[in-house]
Amino acid sequence: MKRWGGWFAMIAVVFLAVPAMAAMTVKLGVVTKPGSAQNIAAEKFKALVDERTNGEVTVKVFHSASLGNETEILQQIQMGTVEMGVITSGVFDTFDPIVRVIDYPFLFRDDAQADAVLDGPLGAEILTGLEASGFKGLCFSENGFRNLTNSKRPVRTAADVSGLKIRVMDSALHNAIWQSMGANPTPMPWPIYTELEQGVIDGQENPLWVLEVYRFHEIQKYLTLTRHVYSPHIAVASLSWWNRLAPEMQSLLQTAMKAAAVFQRADNRARDADRLRMLEEEGMQIEKRPDIASFREKTDVMREMNLYQDPRVKSLLARMLA
Ligand code: EAX
C-alpha cells in the first residue's frame, strides 16, 4: 500500500508539474526586418526561452510589420490577440503619455546615463505605469540615439533644418520636436523607404543601424549626428495574458527578456563605429559635430508645452531632468 502511495504521489507530481510547462506558443511582433535592433532582441529572447523551457515554449517572431505597424501591434497586445512585442518608445505616447518623458529632446548625454535611468527606479515607474493601458512592461532594449538624415542639404545648425520635410513617428512629441526646430514634420508609420526614395519626404531621423539595415545611404545624402533623442524599445506583454501565467513562467520570461536586452544593447553599440565608416565610404556626407546648442535653444522650452502638463508626466519629467 505504501509503495502504491509513493507511485501515486510521483505520478501526481508529474501531472501537476505539466500545466506550468505546458507547450505554448507566444506571438511576438516587431515592425522591422531581420538584422534590425528589435529583431536581434526578439531572436535572442526566443533562443533563451527555448533553451530554458527545453523547447516547451516557442516564441514565434513576426517581423517586417507582418502584424501591422507599431501602433497596430500595440493594439493587438492590448486586446490579447498578440502576446508580446518589442516596440519603439516613441509610439507609446498615444497609449500612455508618461512614456514621452523618455523621448524628451537631449535628455540623455550618453549610453551609460540612459542605462542608469531606464534600468533604475524611474524606468521601473514607467514600466509599471504601462499596466493602466493593458501592457506588462518587461524592460528596455534599444533603438539608440536618433540622428537626422536628409536628401536636400548639409545640416549643422538648427537654422539649416528650416522647412525640411521630416518624417516622424506617430507621436505628438516627435512632431512637436521638429516643429519647434522649424522643420515641417510629417507623422508616418514605419517603413518609409518608398516615401524617402520618391521624395515625398526630404528626411528622417533614426539611429545608425537603421541606415545600414535599410540602406538609407542610397537615398539620403546628408547625415547629422544630432543624437537629439535616445530611443529605447520597450518589451511588453499583454497584461491579461501575463496575469494568467504561473509565477515561475512569468519570472522565466522576464529574466530571459532582460538578458536579451542586455545582449542587444551591447551588440548595437559595438557596431556603431563600423557603421559610421561604412556610411562615409558609401558617400554620405556626415556632420559629426553639429551645433547642438542651436538645437537645444529651440527645444528647451518644450517642457512647458501642454504635452508635459499632465501632473504624472510633469512630475516624472522634472525628476528626469534633475
Ligand atoms: O526602429 O519608426 C521608427 O522611426 C523606428 O525608430 C523604426 O521603426 C526603427
Image (cartoon, grey):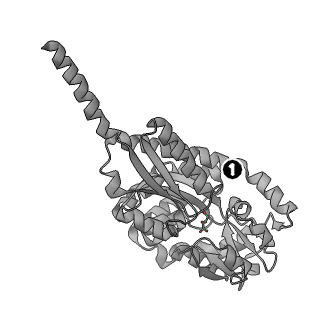
Q: Position of residue 221 (x, y in %)?
A: 81, 73
- Mark 1 surroundings: few (<14), some (14-19) or many (≥20) residues within 10 A: some
Q: Is residue 268 left or right of residue 22?
A: right
Q: Position of residue 114 (x, y in %)?
A: 58, 53
Whether residue 263 is situated above or below residue 92 in the rendered picture: above
| Label 1 residue SS | helix
Residue 206 versus residue 296: which sits nearer the camera?
Answer: 206
**The quarter of the picture showing ligand 1:** bottom right
Q: Is residue 104 left or right of residue 110?
A: left
Task: Determine the residue positioned at 32% across, 47% down.
Answer: 245
Tell me the residue that label 1 is attached to.
269
Q: Position of residue 43 (x, y in %)?
A: 56, 49
Residue 322 seen in the figure:
no
Asked where in the image residue 64 lies, by quadrant, the reply is bottom right
Q: Position of residue 162 (x, y in %)?
A: 72, 84
- Give the amino acid at mark 1: Arg
Whether residue 253 is situated above or below residue 304 in the rendered picture: above
